[in-house]
Amino acid sequence: MDLDDTPEQAAYRGRVRDWLREHRGEAPVLRGPDALTDEQEIIAARRAWQGKLAEAGLAGVTWPKEFGGQGLGPIEQVICNQEIAAAGVPGILDAIGVGMLGPTIIAHGSEAQKSRYLGPMLHGDEVWCQLFSEPAAGSDLAAVQTRAQQTDDGRWRLNGQKVWTTNAQFSSYGLLLARTDADVAKHNGLTMFVVPMDAEGVTVRGLRQISGEAEFNEVFFDDVLLDSDAVVGGVGAGWGTALTTLMFERVTIGLGGEGLGFNSARFAGAIASDPHASRDPEVRARLGELASELMAVRFTGYRTLTALQRGQIPGPEAGLAKVTIVNGAIKAGELIADVLGPDALEDGGEWAYMISFLPGLKSAGGTEEILRNTIGERVLGLPPEPRLDKGIPFSELRAKEASRA
Ligand SMILES: Cc1cc2nc3c(=O)[nH]c(=O)nc-3n(C[C@H](O)[C@H](O)[C@H](O)COP(=O)(O)OP(=O)(O)OC[C@H]3O[C@@H](n4cnc5c(N)ncnc54)[C@H](O)[C@@H]3O)c2cc1C
């Protein structure tokens, strides 16, 4: 997003830019010939960099001051994302913790949980992961089957499996949604827990992606014992707590496109490096089309920002930003690959990672189909589709569709 700053915002932007100019040499190098290659070294360097950003007030910009944040608004967060991207340095390592799980603990956690977990999370001393999705519970998250049963001494015994857990391989803690009561309606029988990832019975197994990296994992829980104070937000109140996380997830992804480097000037720069392609009418038309889509997202993003700035919760239309940004970036990747040829896929190069990682982002933070359905029904007022929670399994719907075709 490219904002018309007020004088105060311009002054804030200037301070962020000055700090980044002075300290960018301390940031880890993740791409190009000088990039770090050892995974452990990369994690250590990114944690240290997050600590520096936090010290400078460039992490947890919207967190309340009492928890180490800056108590600023979402516009300052976006300014910060923009300046970090423009400086060509990585953002914080634990975007999931600071962007989604920390705010969930701030909203629903006990005082003891807030004072124990938030500081180390913000500074990258303890990284967190989101233990929500399961093999049979993704879009239909309320179907989670991981069970937590209370023991006689008030502790909880955890059994089950999660999947697609980003950063689990180096996380200290996870925020986990489990079923604590199987005899009530599925949304009512859920509870949120803090799980120490080094607890006995926790096994993390990496899933390697086409990008070559193994950012997400399967996580297994075999008779893991959790203390009674591991519950976040109350027993049976897990669905409401999870919705808070998902709301922050939507906002983080929707407003974070710029921070991820998905902007048309950067894409145009890659194409301009090939003088022949940059004069080709088809290439220019494709670039123009995706630049206008990204511009439309920017203006839709202004609406989300305005709602957030007024203290409102953004509506379902915020999901449109995620769908459009991801599809715009996928189209940009395809265009850049067409123009640069195999060079675009060179290992460690600027584009290979983006091109191979993006298809996954179509699912992360709500799949494209789910978001489009939500927008169709709740924003455009189109007739609703039969829903899983009305008792019609999605597999049956698909089978019916297939038999109609
Ligand atoms: C890069 C990445 C990182 C992730 N990180 C995490 C993480 O850290 N923690 C975590 O808990 N999860 C994480 N996830 C999981 C993510 O939340 C899920 O992929 C997502 O919720 C979709 O669930 P699923 O993969 O089980 O797909 P499913 O829900 O099984 O869907 C499969 C397909 O069916 C479609 N579909 C399903 N239901 C409907 C319906 N009612 N109507 C129409 N179409 C439907 C979907 O759109 C999709 O195309 C991550 C995923 C990715 C890709």
Image (cartoon, grey):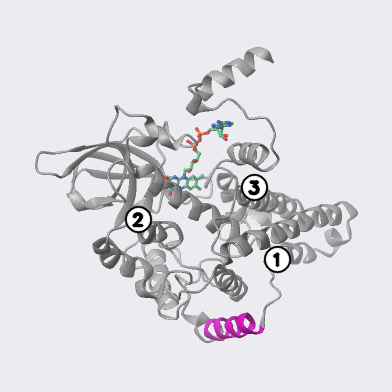
Disc 2 secondary structure class? helix
Circle 2: residue type: His
Camera-side mark, 2 or 1: 2
Residue carrying label 2: 108
In the rendered view of the protein, which quadrant contains the C terminus?
Answer: top right
| Disc 2 + disc 1, Cβ < 8 Å | no
Name the residue rendered at 51%, 21% in the picture: 392
Residue 16 percent coordinates (x, y): 55, 81
Task: Tell which circle, 1 or 3, labels the residue nearer the N-terminal end.
Answer: 1
Circle 1: residue type: Arg
Secondary structure mostly seen in the magenta stretch: helix
Camera-side mark, 1 or 3: 3
Residue carrying label 1: 266
Residue carrying label 3: 323
| Disc 1 + disc 3, Cβ < 8 Å | no
In the rendered image, the vertical position of residue 289 relative to residue 59, given as above or below? above
Q: Which residues are magenta?
A: 7-20
Residue 347 percent coordinates (x, y): 57, 56
Query: Spatial distance from mark 2 to mark 1, Cα to Cα?
Result: 39 Å
